[in-house]
Amino acid sequence: MHLSENEGIEGVRFAVTGGQGFVGSALCLELLRRGAREVRSLDLRASSPWSDQLLGAGVRFFQGDVRKKEDVGKALRGVDCVFHLASYGMSGKEMVQAGRADEVNINGTCNVLDACHEHGVRRLVYVSTYNVVFGGEPIVNGSEVLPYFPIEDHVDAYARSKSIAEQLVLKSNGRQTKSDKSSRLYTCSIRPAAIYGPGEERHLPRILSLAKLGLAFFKIGDPNVKSDWVYVDNLVLALILASMGLLDDIPDRKGIPVAAGQAYFICDGSPVNTFEFLSPLFQSLDYTVPRVRMDTSVALAISRFFVFMYTLLYPWLDSKWIPQPLLLPAEVYKVGVTHYFSYLKAREEIGYVPMVSPREGLAATISYWQERKRKELDGPTIFPWLFVTIGMLALFSAAYLPPVGPLKWVLDLHLFVFRSKLVIRLVFVIATALHVGEAVYAWFLAKKYDPRNATGWFWQTFMLGFFSLRYLPTSELEVPRTTSILQPDGRVTTASVGGERKQPNEKKKNR
């Protein structure tokens, strides 16, 4: 295409489903930056981490559910182009909730298509996934000629429902609008790789939370396994180019948009082993890089156990007390089986070329997570938690509970060490008093050095004592801060970024 930077954007009304999400918010802001007349965000959430920025930029919020026709119709009435990003079931517990995934991804997409037909929307860009063609079989430098992976063979509801939805979108290409028989709806699909960048909320937070607890033990699959990633800014660029590719007044196209009815793979163009890709991020945050390698077949067996357990817990999966599963089959395939694709078709037809390199994107992501870690409550891995919690519970049961069943063995062990029940009770009282004293001391220190997390430091230190207290910063204003720098060879080096005493009114620099 030979188009200007803002062709089909200036003076145009847009709607973005899932507009308060990570990619949706970046897309809304870029559309406004390029001169869009109006950008609407349809999202189930009333707010998100990007709400203030979106409101400040002028995005118009529509709180609603894509599963409800009236909500979709209200948001899409009067717009020229729609970006359909809203989805469900991409990761974690959501992957087990097949019913909701179908409702959002299939029924929601049908509602979007119906609203486009009803209100005369001329362009629809659908955000799909690699998984419409990938289901566990290796793919090397794949292209858009690959057939859809068989619906019945998908191991997760997300991939299956997204595949159905994409086919519905592409088959709706060229459909006449209800309000104007001379006008047609043109559609296309963008299939992004795994998305990363500062603020990504699906994959990296879950991976890093496991690493923080010391539970990221294993690398899955052969070290030669490779897959694609895409930086958020590159994906936003591809979405905007795809919307331009649906314009029906492009010269020499005789009214037929170049992207109409097409699907495009979008990535950074640098396939890499997932664990190799994430290692600099782990190192920069002082987390242990996974070293033990696990065979893909073993990981699949473990992941199927989690599917079975979480299926039993299906009615309660929305509850916060149920943690995220450690591993699921689709995730094993993503990191343990080679699958990467060429963006050649996107380059030739809509002009997509990544504008942010993987090194630049990862460096920005590392900076974001370093800053986030400085603001959050730090602490030990799960092993001190287990050691202290089990130890205190055992001491309490030996001191005060009747020796029934296995508690008799607990009491005998404590009597062997402390000789009498009176001494056991005295030790428990002293230990509890020490925990309370350390918690109060941690709270006073945190009020001075980390006030936003003072309450968290109190309760964590009450539970763990010294194991928590040792992580509390007590000289943040005087100790030089450091940052990790990603080198061209993939190494992470440390450099000082300040050592002088900060003034109380010094403003933090934006990153």
Image (cartoon, grey):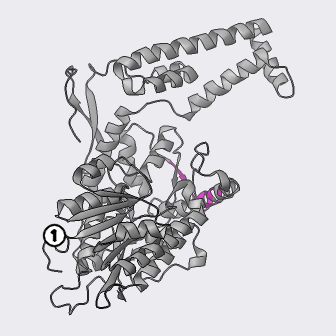
- Determine whether the residue tagged by mark 1 lies in a helix, strand or loop: loop
Report the side of 261 relative to 212 (left or right).
left
The quarter of the rendered structure image containing the N terminus is: bottom left
The residue type indicated by label 1 comes to Asn
The location of residue 489, given as percent across then percent down, is 27, 51
The location of residue 266, given as percent across then percent down, is 33, 70
**Mark 1 — residue?**
6
Between 103 and 311, which is closer to the camera in this rendering?
Answer: 103
Q: Is residue 264 above or below residue 507?
A: below
Report the side of 408 relative to 311 (left or right).
right
The location of residue 233, given as percent across then percent down, is 27, 59
Q: In the displayed image of the protein, which residue is found farthest to the bottom?
A: 254
Residue 135 appears anywhere in the view = no
The location of residue 422, given as percent across then percent down, is 77, 6
Residue 450 appears anywhere in the view = yes
Magenta stretch bounds = 292-303
Q: Quadrant of residue 445?
A: top left
Q: Quadrant of residue 389?
A: top right
Q: Residue at x 16, y 74 (%)?
A: 7
Between 270 and 2, which is closer to the camera in this rendering?
Answer: 2
Q: Quadrant of residue 296?
A: bottom right
Q: Is residue 297 magenta?
A: yes
Q: Residue at x 55, y 80 (%)?
A: 150
Q: In the displayed image of the protein, which residue is found farthest to the right?
A: 404
The quarter of the rendered structure image containing the C terminus is: top left
Q: Main secondary structure of the magenta part?
A: helix
Looking at the rendered structure, the number of numbered marks drawn on it comes to: 1
Q: Residue at x 44, y 62 (%)?
A: 224
Q: Tag 1: Cα neighbours inside 10 Å, few (<14), some, or many (≥20)?
A: some
